[in-house]
């Protein structure tokens, strides 16, 4: 039972890490909280659902959902955030919230308010170990494998490529990076493409896990994402992964062994408050000198 709960917690944390990674990357460069990234979570799931219906191919549905959502992220950066670069971060935050609400209503109008099935289940059989009272679901393997591969690719991009070097320089000081000849517009655009692609993968995987997509499926990820990136240390990709696993494990173990004395989604914020009382800068954030 304990092993089952631990694996479940890792799976949930993996989804949280993918969901929050896009917003972490955007904050790392632009110092704004991109709430509309949670809208990409639902868009990716719906695009995959549509192409699964049209083609019957899970691979085509997955790839198309990620690619089109990543392209949408480029458009969001170019036509929403780029014109607001010199404005107050609060203006960008409000714009992102407005876009997120618009996307939810748009999906409701286009696809209807009811939940739809995103059925990949027949391709992902479960494995049972009766002696250990353990069931390993095929979707868990898919989520863990996808998360591991994407985070490895992200690490290689950030630490072993020229675009990663440009990203780190831009995140440290955008104006200085621009003065040194770095094409910061390209770096920021790449950031959004990557971030929205990550959100799309998370939305598709959750749709597969629960065999359901619906217009408001980005609601909970929108505020859970904030808890993860704040706990991880605002703009720190590694901290985001660690915070996501901590929250995923806490939700699963507390919900499984102590009981639902409060809503499951509220556990993330209880954990956030307790850890920030100990480390106000987050798990891997740097304490600012006064």
Image: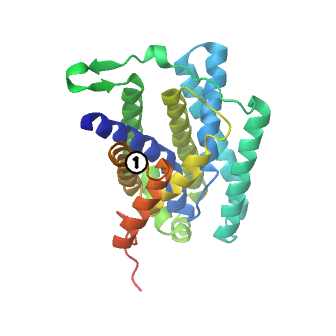
Image point (37%, 31%), residue name: 145
Is residue 123 in view?
yes
Where disc 1 sits, the SS reads: helix
- In terms of depth relative to the viewer, which is nearer, 159 or 48? 48
Quarter placement of the C terminus: bottom left
- In terms of depth relative to the viewer, which is nearer, 227 or 54? 227
- In terms of depth relative to the viewer, which is nearer, 262 or 110? 262
The image position of residue 150, as x and y in percent, is: 42, 38
Image point (37%, 75%), residue name: 287
* Residue furthest bottom in the image: 290
* Residue 214 position by quadrant: top right
- The 10 Å Cα crowd at callout 1, few under 14, some 14 to 19, many 20 or more, is many
Instruction: Using the image, determine if residue 131 lies above or below residue 194.
Output: above
Instruction: Using the image, determine if residue 138 lies above or below residue 256.
Output: above
Image point (37%, 24%), residue name: 137
Image point (47%, 13%), residue name: 122
Is residue 182 in view?
no
Q: Which residue is mark 1?
A: 251
The image position of residue 56, as x and y in percent, is: 59, 13
Quarter placement of the N terminus: top left
The image position of residue 213, as x and y in percent, is: 61, 31
Please indicate whether residue 80 sits to the left or right of residue 35 in the image: right
Q: How many marks?
A: 1
- In terms of depth relative to the viewer, which is nearer, 77 or 204? 204
* Residue furthest right in the image: 109
């Amino acid at each position: 039972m304990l092993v089952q709960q631990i694996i479940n917690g890792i799976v949930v944390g993996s989804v949280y890490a993918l969901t929050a990674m896009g917003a972490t990357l955007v904050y790392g460069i632009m110092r704004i909280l991109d709430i509309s990234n949670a809208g990409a979570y639902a868009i990716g799931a719906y695009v995959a659902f549509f192409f699964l219906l049209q083609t019957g191919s899970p691979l085509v549905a997955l790839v198309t959902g990620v690619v089109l959502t990543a392209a949408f992220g480029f458009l969001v950066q170019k036509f929403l955030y780029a014109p607001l670069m010199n404005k107050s971060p609060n203006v960008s935050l409000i714009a992102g919230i407005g876009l997120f609400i618009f996307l939810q209503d748009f999906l409701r109008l286009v696809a209807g308010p009811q939940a739809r099935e995103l059925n990949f289940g027949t391709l992902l059989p479960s494995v049972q170990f009766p002696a250990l009272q353990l069931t390993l679901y095929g979707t868990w393997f898919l989520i863990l494998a996808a998360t591991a591969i994407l985070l490895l690719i992200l690490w290689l991009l950030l630490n072993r490529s020229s675009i990663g070097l440009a990203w780190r320089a831009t995140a440290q000081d955008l104006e200085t990076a621009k003065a040194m000849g770095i094409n910061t517009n390209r770096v920021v655009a790449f950031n959004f493409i990557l971030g929205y692609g990550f959100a799309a993968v998370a939305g598709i995987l959750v749709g597969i896990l629960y065999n359901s997509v619906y217009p408001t499926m980005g609601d909970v990820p929108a505020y859970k994402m904030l808890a993860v990136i704040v706990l991880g240390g605002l703009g720190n990709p590694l901290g985001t992964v660690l915070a996501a696993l901590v929250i995923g494990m806490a939700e699963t173990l507390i919900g499984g062994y102590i009981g639902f004395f409060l809503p499951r989604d509220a556990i993330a914020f209880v954990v956030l408050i307790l850890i920030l009382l100990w480390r106000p800068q987050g798990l891997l954030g740097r304490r600012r000198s006064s």
